Image: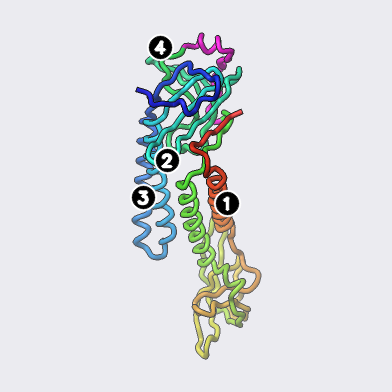
Amino acid sequence: MNPDLSFTLRPEEKVIFATKSTAKFLFRKLLHILLGLILMAVGILMLTDREQLWWGALFLFGGLALLYLVGLDIKRTRNTYYQLTTQRAMVIELFGGKSKPTVFSFPLDAYLIQHVKHHRNRTTDYLFAQDNLSLASRGAIGFYNLSPDIFTNEQWSELGLQLPAKNTPIKKLPAIKRPATWRHVVGCLIGSVLLGGVTYDMLYDAGADLHLFGQEKEAIVIAHEEDTERRGKRREVAIYYPVVIYEHAGSLIKTTALAGYRTPVDTGDTITILADPHDESRVIPAEDTDESVFSPVVFALCTIGCFLCFVGAGIRIYRNREQPYHEISFS
């Protein structure tokens, strides 16, 4: 039995049909559950290594987030209702409890239905827009598994709707934006912290912080340690990390620099280094080093993006705090 959906109706708006969703998306759910478990297992293994702590936390959180999205999608599917009126098509998600209902509202125009898929059991999917934030399984907003006993193609035509002759790929459907909830705020905040931690860890390992906080010292190069780094898809370059000796607090310190050269410096040469005042083993050459900054920059940009999503979600929640339910109108 369908719940009372009259709160969605406008004045003089009449219901043509209302039914509960029977979409399941079982296969995609299983794949995402498996992927989430794998990410969690990798994260737990990495957490045992202190040097991989941030990476382990990132993988663990990613797996938990994916499993949470799958669980949320299962709950969403079980509590989704479709309602067609004389003015609109609506997809209504009722989570129950203190969660606000979410109403996706699409006006009845000729191009309402963007994608049609017929199933062997005679049910049909009528899709209206792409659902960007339902990553786990849905992919689009619309009426799934609609039986011909409820509504037929001929009845859609009688309403003035044109069914597409060819199926438009779901990825090319017009996008719709879901309402912000506290789940988005908390998730973006945790993501910002973890991505920021990984970025800092990568920059710390490369000694990038010493460009700002390092102390200049004179050091003698006594050897080199050669390593190979991949730049781009196939290109590999040899990097020579100088082994240096320098004076710190009256003692001679021998250490390998965190940044190196494409061409090795002659053994016995004196170079200027930047040394960590709190950890004498962390040094980098002051000039002319070859530093790969692509990965840290990518993670830094992801951190900034995640933090901006956190701020944006908070603002959207504040603006919509007085609404009894979320209504997403598509036009």
Which of these two is toward me, 234 or 57? 57
Q: What is the distance, in whole Å, between disc 1 and disc 3 at their CAs? A: 26 Å
Residue that label 3 marks: 40
Badge 3 density bin: few <14, some 14–19, many ≥20, Cα 10 Å: many
As displayed, is residue 120 above or below residue 137?
A: above
Is residue 87 visible in this depiction of the protein?
Answer: yes
Q: Residue most toward the bottom? A: 250
* Residue type highlighted by circle 3: Met
* Residue type highlighted by circle 4: Asp
User: In terms of sequence position, does the residue under pointer 2 or pointer 1 come before the other?
Assistant: 2
| x and y percentages locating residue 174 in the rendered image | 58, 30
Q: Residue most toward the front? A: 11
Q: What is the distance, in whole Å, between disc 1 and disc 4 at their CAs? A: 47 Å
For label 4, the SS is: loop
Q: What is the distance, in whole Å, between disc 2 and disc 3 at their CAs? A: 28 Å
* Residue type highlighted by circle 2: Ser
User: In terms of sequence position, does the residue under pointer 1 or pointer 3 come before the other?
Assistant: 3
| x and y percentages locating residue 224 in the rendered image | 53, 72
Q: In the rendered structure, which segment of residues is drawn in magenta?
A: 152-171
As displayed, is residue 286 above or below residue 248?
A: above
Magenta highlight: main SS: loop
Q: What is the distance, in whole Å, between disc 3 and disc 4 at their CAs? A: 44 Å
Badge 2 density bin: few <14, some 14–19, many ≥20, Cα 10 Å: few
- Are circles 1 and 4 on residues that touch, CB within 8 Å? no
- Give the foreground label among 4 and 2: 2
- Give the foreground label among 2 and 3: 2
Q: Residue at x 58, y 81 (%)?
A: 220
Q: Residue at x 49, y 54 (%)?
A: 189
Residue that label 2 marks: 99
* Residue type highlighted by circle 1: Leu
Badge 1 density bin: few <14, some 14–19, many ≥20, Cα 10 Å: some
